[in-house]
Image (spheres, rainbow, N blue to C red):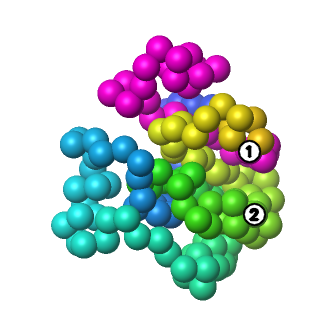
Amino acid sequence: MKIFQGIDHEIQRLYIHWDITTKCNYNCNYCYAKLHYISKKQWQKEIDIKTINNIITSISFSSLPVFLGLLGGEPTLSKNYFYILDKIQEKILFKKDRNRLYITTNLSKDLEWWRKHPKLERTFILASFHPEYHNKKTIEEFIE
């Protein structure tokens, strides 16, 4: 029996969901991350560079292809966001042909910020739309 694996989906892959920050510019009452981190008194926290380096180095040792997700809070608000991207590119993404990265963002950064965002190979941007924080203009920018 053949199992449909979808586009670029593999059963034998290390899937990692990494909340790189718990900072967020939205205050959604349904946010699972906020509820989890507030209960642990860790809301609005950042991790330090040493911890970032340790996590990325540990992931780089995987014998399986890696599918790494950056989330939060809002990951683009992390003061270390671009540092993390650089290190992932350097130590993980190109180590194996099938390694991938995804970034889940509320796309609250303006369109110019995204136009300047580095174009990363093997990387997907997942948009988490929050209509309660947008008007017609920002919705059109979000779609663009």
Amino acid type at mark 1: His
26 above or below 62?
Answer: above
Q: Which residues are magenta?
A: 117-144
Read off the residue under disc 2.
86
Q: Residue at x 64, y 51 (%)?
A: 101
Q: Residue at x 61, y 80 (%)?
A: 49
Mark drawn on residue 104: none
Secondary structure beneath dot 2 equals: helix
Q: Position of residue 75 (x, y in %)?
A: 52, 54
Q: Position of residue 43 (x, y in %)?
A: 32, 65
Amino acid type at mark 2: Asp
Query: Dividing the picture into quarters, in which one does residue 95 lie?
Result: bottom right
Read off the residue under disc 1.
117
Q: Position of residue 126 (x, y in %)?
A: 54, 37
12 above or below 53?
Answer: above
4 relative to 63 in the view: left or right: left
Query: Dividing the picture into quarters, in which one does residue 60 lie?
Result: bottom right
Q: State the separation of the CA atoms marked 1 and 2.
A: 12 Å
Secondary structure beneath dot 1 equals: loop
- Seen from the viewer's position, the closer of residues 128 and 111 is 111
133 relative to 118 in the view: left or right: left
132 above or below 35?
Answer: above
141 relative to 88 in the view: left or right: left
Q: Residue at x 37, y 25 (%)?
A: 131
Q: Residue at x 42, y 25 (%)?
A: 134
The C terminus, quarter of image: top right
